[in-house]
Amino acid sequence: MTSSARPLRADAARNRELLLAAAEEEFAARGIDASIADIADRAGVAKATVFSHFASKEELIAAIVGGHFATLTAVARRLLATADPEAALSEFLTVAADGIKQQDLTFLRADDDSRVTELRNELHVAVSALTDRARAAGVIRADITGTDVFLLICAPVHIAGCHPTAHPDLWRRYQAIIFDGLRPSGANSLPQPPPSWP
Amino acid sequence: MTSSARPLRADAARNRELLLAAAEEEFAARGIDASIADIADRAGVAKATVFSHFASKEELIAAIVGGHFATLTAVARRLLATADPEAALSEFLTVAADGIKQQDLTFLRADDDSRVTELRNELHVAVSALTDRARAAGVIRADITGTDVFLLICAPVHIAGCHPTAHPDLWRRYQAIIFDGLRPSGANSLPQPPPSWP
Amino acid sequence: MTSSARPLRADAARNRELLLAAAEEEFAARGIDASIADIADRAGVAKATVFSHFASKEELIAAIVGGHFATLTAVARRLLATADPEAALSEFLTVAADGIKQQDLTFLRADDDSRVTELRNELHVAVSALTDRARAAGVIRADITGTDVFLLICAPVHIAGCHPTAHPDLWRRYQAIIFDGLRPSGANSLPQPPPSWP
Amino acid sequence: MTSSARPLRADAARNRELLLAAAEEEFAARGIDASIADIADRAGVAKATVFSHFASKEELIAAIVGGHFATLTAVARRLLATADPEAALSEFLTVAADGIKQQDLTFLRADDDSRVTELRNELHVAVSALTDRARAAGVIRADITGTDVFLLICAPVHIAGCHPTAHPDLWRRYQAIIFDGLRPSGANSLPQPPPSWP
DNA sequence: GATGAATGAGGTTTCATTCAT
DNA sequence: GATGAATGAAACCTCATTCAT
């Protein structure tokens, strides 16, 4: 999952995974203000160890977000090889939302650099492919682009998150509504052109 | 717009508005971690002045969020008196999104108490009325509730906010898509029951 | 009670007394860190009014302490005119402790200037007279001075205050013990000469 | 003297002692309102270092007070093993007052929790033992309890502290007076029963 | 590579005091 | 004379980050 470069000693690699997992949980629980101290505690390592793996908090966040992007890209690519374009797109959105849960990928956006942007672009490409195929099959409207779908990934989770005491699966309801909105039947023309991708 | 109780001296009232405006801008720019110092600077007053108007940061946030709720409630009530149920609902969502812009009402939710919760509940009632009328008129699906619409208010802005360099009006595109998803034509059954309101 | 100088309008005089009373209660309850705001609240006036009566917190404290000194001086002088030297000294210490209760005159000491020092010196003189008379009558040891007695005034209340959950009259116990220590019978010579008074 | 648990690295232990010493001096000089910043300065460390040793100002105070209690308990226990009951009690009070100097153990009392209370209770037990032995030997009155002596510990220092410009050893004078008050000879009955210990 | 300790920068909040009404 | 509002200084505390072991 770490993808590139250096070998990393066995225990170090394990600590890295422990930290990523702990950080993800802590961010999910406390939001972006979760402290490095709490993350280190949860992972069972010392605070300084966090910095021997990630040069800064930003870099740790980038690793998490980048990981999500990479995972989703893999999912999208796998689904691209399946037969049913509608099922593929639908399942992608479901898997994505399910994986993200309370976590908002919006955390970081483009305010960082290189690596995450690259991974995000790869996901964008893969999602666009899924979208193009669905559009070609008449599953979704002609005026919906891959970028639209990309931006919509987090929406269902976010919407459900606005409810003070939501059922954990409430997001599925809004995903279905949005998906219906993407369908060709009964579609009205859109007031704003599709966004370009930088 | 501040609605309640005491008269407030002229200059104090002015400072209060300056502060609310500055806080809103600062929160929009830096998120919920915007510092009181920066807010005070932007409003051109001393840090301590902020606390003479709002006893704590939480209370300042509550004032902003509560203000939004109150404004939206007023809008919803006004539109309830207009003739066209579809136009009313549509315009409500538009005005709401436009007013909120980059700001996420999710900020505070129910983790606080009394006043904001009350104002939110009033908005919920007003939105439900708008929704009921639209449903009765066949404008939206039979299985969509006022709570659904309430939760969807912020979605378009949030979705557009996921784009790194979005056009300021991009949210209108996603609002149209979601609204289409709420329409009766081509609606598929929803996987999750509508959420109750606490 | 305000003793000297200017006439003071009727309502202003009333506010001054209200403030002194409120301050005394608040200091008794919260210690020297009681805030001007709380004192003003308790007196039912605005914070700024406090400063129109007392130029600073120090001055307010000085007024209270000075008031206690003046009261005690009056008491001592009155008792000096009574017949029984032992009863006089004993009652003085009792009245003093009772009036002070949880309040520590030590609050301020000599770190301030003029007026309070003057009042304290007057009290010192009166207490010395009471003490001299008691010593002459053989009620207390030959080696006990007025300054000794002056310093001992607050001791009983302070000692009882060291108990976490003391009976409100516990100080009487320690006053009796100390008074016994001052008596001629069974007195041992003291390791330290009596302190001079500045 | 720190007694408990973890090993602590060499330099950290040194800093902890520096901090405790600096805090004690600063509290003695400025009272309980001494600032953490000043304490840190005096110890030659950064402000944040104080908090890495003591989680809060309260905890720092607790460490100091607890330390005094522990020290005094050790002293009392040692003296309990000596031959002369009078000398033992007398020396205990002397050592206690000397160690405390201008410092008032009253600072914190029972308004905190667990550890300090426990240490205070241990001291109370030890003092009671010393007292019982002295009473049994006829050195002090029959109606004086260990709790009385416990409460009297700080009195001499406090009394001397009421003098604006006292000789540093003035407290010895008042300790002698109080000790005389505790003696059987010439004792009058006490107006208030001995306090119980919570 | 991992850690305990130290730290500088900054956050929210309190408070005595001043000023304009 | 009284007040509501404004303020500067300072307090306690947190946290990402660096350093020596």
Image (tube, coloured by chain):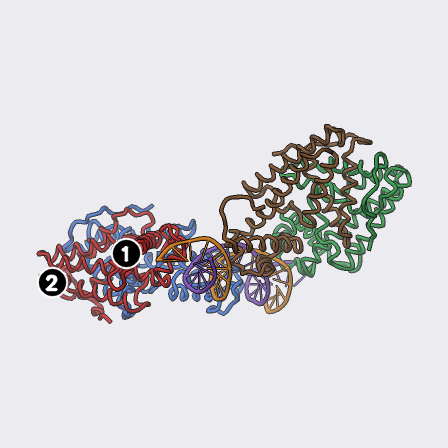
Chain colours: A red, B blue, C green, D brown, E orange, F purple
The residue lying toward the viewer, choosing from B95 and B195, is B195
Q: Position of residue A83 (x, y in %)?
A: 8, 56
Image quadrant where residue A67 sits: bottom left
Q: Position of residue A95 (x, y in %)?
A: 20, 53
- Residue type (three-letter) at the residue carrying disc 2: Arg
Q: Position of residue C131 (x, y in %)?
A: 86, 43
Position of A159 with respect to B38 (left or right) is left
Relative to D138, is A76 on the left or the right? Answer: left
Q: Residue at x 61, y 54 (%)?
A: D23
The foreground one among A89 and D181 is D181
Q: Residue at x 22, y 68 (%)?
A: A191
From this view, report whether residue C175 is shown above or below residue D55. above
Give the position of the N terminus of chain A as an image quadrant.
bottom left
Q: Nearer the viewer, residue D132 or D5?
A: D5
Looking at the picture, how far across and down is residue C16, in whole percent?
70, 54
Local SS, label 1: helix
Residue at screen point 60% across, 37% down: D122
- Element at badge 2? helix
Amino acid marked by disc 1: Leu
Using the image, determine if residue D32 lies above or below residue A142.
above
Q: Nearer the viewer, mark 1 or mark 2?
A: 2
Classify the position of the C terminus of chain A by image quarter: bottom left
Total label count?
A: 2
Residue of label 1:
B152
Instruction: Name the chain letter of the residue that bears numbered label 1.
Output: B
Viewer-nearest residue: C166 or C73: C166
Residue wearing tag 2 = A133
**Quarter of the image where one finds residue A17:** bottom left
Please identify the quarter of the rendering in which residue A13 is found: bottom left
Can residue A183 be seen here?
Answer: yes
Instruction: Bin the neighbour count of mark 2 within 10 Å (Cα to Cα): few under 14, some 14-19, many 20 and up.
Output: some
